[in-house]
Amino acid sequence: MKKLSNIFIFFALMCVSATTAYSQDCNSYLKQATELRDKGDYCQAKQYYQMYQSCNADADVSTEIAMCENRIKLQNPGTDCPDYVPANGKSVTSTNTSSNRHAVKSVSSVDKSVTPATRFKVGLDIGGQLPMNSNFKNSYKIGFGGGLNAKYMVNKNIGVGLGAGYYTFGAKSEHLNELKNELIDENGVGNIDNIKDNFAIIPIVGKFSYYFGQNAFKPYVGVDLGLYMLRESLNAESDGQSGSNSSSTNKFGFAPVIGFEYALSNNLGLDVNVKYHEIFSDGSNGISSLGVNVGLVYSF
């Protein structure tokens, strides 16, 4: 129960962190709008106010937007100042005019604050895995590996899909010495010249993700749930002879995840995430690890 309680606390903290990051991302639009307004760039200021309003549904900056529109009409009559266009929105200009002598580009055309609506995401990431529970971290070093995943976007915020990965861990010297002694006792050999022990975790999981907002920077939280294949391979040499042994078992597990995507282009994005893998096993042999991953995601 204590371990499950710690996991839930960890997941709650991740959710709070993601919400805070999302709030800060929205507030950056308000800050830029204020700075642009103070500089007299009312067209760009209006668009950033609209971006802030689109990002934060509870925000009311209608007075500021109206002020910017009035200043544009007074200072630059006939200026074509487009409105900010959310994903899937239709372009609407504040002032229709046949002359574009004073035309100003919309914010959505000069930065990556908006990406097109997508239905599928395919990602590839690599990263490290830090053993967490005592039995695991006392026996193995930090692991490395990567994973593939595919998601279907049910709507602009919710994604579901499948993922698979491969992470390998090298044994610590203390653990190798224990294995040597066990093999000597079991086989009656005088000495073991060399021994290697590799441990691998292969998750095959279903994925659920919730994305905050539709901007270039999109925090998300989620959970992986499914099958974890555990593989161990042992190789030893004694008196010029070598032998090997391998074993595998399948266990159920899950992994709360927090991360963010950052749009590098309309379709390609950077994905950074942290996962806490909890693999259930018999007795005190459960396995938990904290993974930090970096990768690319292609949306289409």
Image (cartoon, rainbow, N blue to C red):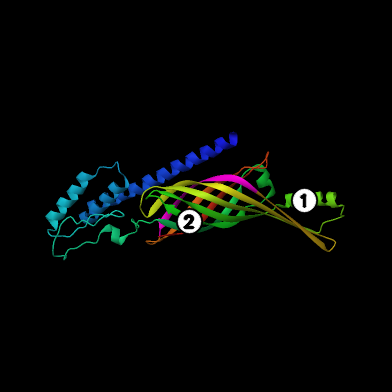
Q: Is residue 279 left or right of residue 240?
A: left
Other-residue count near label 1 (Cα within 10 Å), few / some / many at <14 / 14–19 / ≥20: some
- Tell me the residue at 64%/48% (across/down): 250
Other-residue count near label 2 (Cα within 10 Å), few / some / many at <14 / 14–19 / ≥20: many
Q: Main secondary structure of the magenta part?
A: strand
Marks 1 and 2, how far apart at CA: 39 Å
- Up the image or down, 144 lies above or below 280; here it is below
Q: Is residue 27 left or right of residue 145?
A: left
Query: For the residue labelled by badge 1, is the local secondary structure a helix, a strand or a loop?
Result: helix
Disc 2 marks which residue?
150
Q: Identity of the amino acid at label 1?
A: Leu
Query: For the residue labelled by badge 2, is the local secondary structure a helix, a strand or a loop?
Result: strand
Q: Position of residue 266 (x, y in %)?
A: 37, 61
Disc 1 marks which residue?
179
**Quarter-of-image position of residue 88:** bottom left
Instruction: Look at the image and tell me whether residue 36 can be seen.
Output: no
The magenta stretch spans which residues?
250-263
Q: Position of residue 61 (x, y in %)?
A: 24, 44
Q: Position of residue 122 (x, y in %)?
A: 46, 58
**Quarter-of-image position of residue 192:** bottom right
Q: Pick the residue in front: 186 or 141.
A: 186
Residue 254: within the magenta? yes
- Tell me the residue at 57%/55% (across/down): 165
Q: Position of residue 273 (x, y in %)?
A: 49, 51
Q: Pick the residue in front: 91 or 218.
A: 91
Q: Identity of the amino acid at label 2?
A: Ala
